[in-house]
């Protein structure tokens, strides 16, 4: 059995998207999320977690808790029914009280579902218990704080939104000579940065193991690359950095803010169209890591194609590992 997480880690993940919508806002006609004050593109942590979950279940055959399951009538399962899935093989269930059933569900979900071990979950319960000759439903919940937490992703530059119109293939209505119209909002380009942290203390409660972490990183990198839908096609991972600490309960924090686009103050942000047009400045990042070298166990790095970035200034005492995924 793999050992639990010993110490804390920080993650910086950069990816870009071209002529697409990285994360639509359902409350704003599904337009890309943009901070009106700064012009920065925003992507929710929920979107990134969904990317990871979908990759792990579809490409790695891992079990996840948060997934869409439909019954024979086409009805989508809710969270309470999903929780009951983990009681299906339990014998003598009718003789168990609420807490016994709750503990079985919690144990099985943590053992089986990698997304709960990573991200935690709040799981509502509606369980049937017996009191004498009668049965009744008792409600409650299971709350597990996820050891892996991400902040909102933000673009490293201002973006512009383009509104595109087109025609469909079908008639607008029966007998009509006019075709349907199609409208959408896209970003010509956005380089998005996510910051994450793996908390060794919360990992004890969800039983996150060292073997789970490479799957998380794989899901971030290849999940992003393999998210091939109409609105997401063209996403490419560009940088994945994981800083591993050897001092208990310690991390630097805000590492994502230490990577910038070189000469960004002189660039026309909205005119950037490709990763090859820019270089990434790691001066502050490397300086900060070097200043904390005595507290750093190692640094894991993966750099995508055509990315102009330099880590050569990292102190030689800090072990560098190149991340690779099957």
Image (spheres, rainbow, N blue to C red):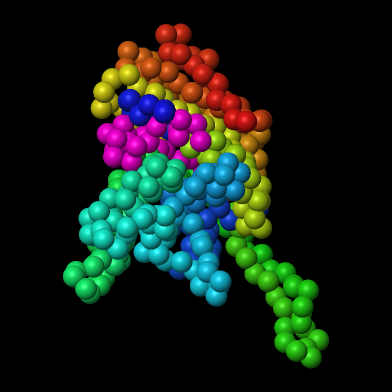
Task: Identify the residue at the far left of this view.
Answer: 132
Relative image position of residue 185 (x, y in whole percent): 60, 62
Q: Is 211 included in the stretch rendered in magenta? A: yes
Task: Identify the residue at the far top of this view.
Answer: 316
Task: Identify the residue at the far bottom of this view.
Answer: 175
Task: Identify the residue at the far right of this view.
Answer: 177
Q: Quadrant of residue 322?
A: top right
Q: Is residue 75 left or right of residue 98?
A: right
Locate the C terminus by quadrant: top right
Locate the N terminus by quadrant: top left
For image coordinates 75% across by 73% down, the residue present is 168
Relative image position of residue 198 (x, y in whole percent): 36, 34
Q: Is residue 211 left or right of residue 295?
A: right
Relative image position of residue 38 (x, y in whole percent): 43, 51
Q: Is residue 44 visible?
A: no
For image coordinates 28% across by 55% down, the residue present is 102
Q: Quadrant of residue 303?
A: top right
Q: Is 113 included in the stretch rendered in magenta? A: no
Q: Read off the magenta span.
A: 191-215
Q: Is residue 231 above or below residue 167?
A: above
């Amino acid at each position: 059995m793999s050992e639990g997480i010993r110490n804390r880690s920080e993650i910086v993940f950069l990816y870009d998207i071209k002529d697409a919508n990285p994360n639509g806002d359902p409350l704003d006609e599904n337009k890309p999320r943009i901070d009106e004050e700064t012009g920065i593109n925003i992507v929710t942590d929920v979107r990134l977690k969904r990317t990871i979950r979908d990759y792990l279940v579809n490409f790695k055959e891992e079990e996840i808790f948060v997934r869409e399951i439909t019954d024979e009538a086409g009805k989508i399962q809710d969270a309470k029914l999903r929780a009951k899935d983990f009681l299906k093989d339990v014998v003598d269930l009718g003789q168990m009280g609420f807490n016994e059933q709750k503990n079985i569900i919690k144990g099985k979900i943590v053992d089986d579902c990698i997304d709960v071990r990573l991200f935690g979950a709040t799981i509502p319960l509606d369980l049937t218990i017996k009191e004498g000759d009668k049965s009744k439903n008792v409600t409650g919940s299971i709350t597990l704080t996820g050891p892996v937490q991400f902040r909102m992703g933000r673009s490293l530059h201002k973006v512009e939104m383009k509104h595109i119109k087109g025609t469909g293939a079908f008639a607008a209505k029966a007998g009509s000579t006019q075709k349907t119209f199609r409208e959408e909002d896209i970003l010509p380009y956005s380089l998005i940065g996510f910051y994450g942290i793996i908390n060794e203390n919360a990992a004890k409660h969800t039983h996150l193991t060292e073997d789970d972490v490479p799957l998380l990183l794989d899901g971030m990198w290849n999940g992003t690359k393999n998210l091939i839908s109409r609105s997401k096609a063209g996403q490419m991972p560009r940088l994945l950095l994981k800083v591993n600490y050897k001092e208990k309960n310690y991390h630097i924090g805000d590492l994502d803010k230490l990577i910038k686009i070189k000469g960004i103050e002189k660039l026309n942000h909205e005119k950037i169209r490709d990763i090859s047009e820019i270089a990434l400045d790691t001066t502050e990042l490397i300086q900060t890591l070097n200043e904390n070298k005595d507290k750093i166990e190692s640094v894991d790095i993966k750099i995508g194609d055509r990315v102009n970035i330099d880590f050569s200034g990292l102190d030689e005492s800090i072990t560098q590992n190149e991340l690779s995924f099957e």
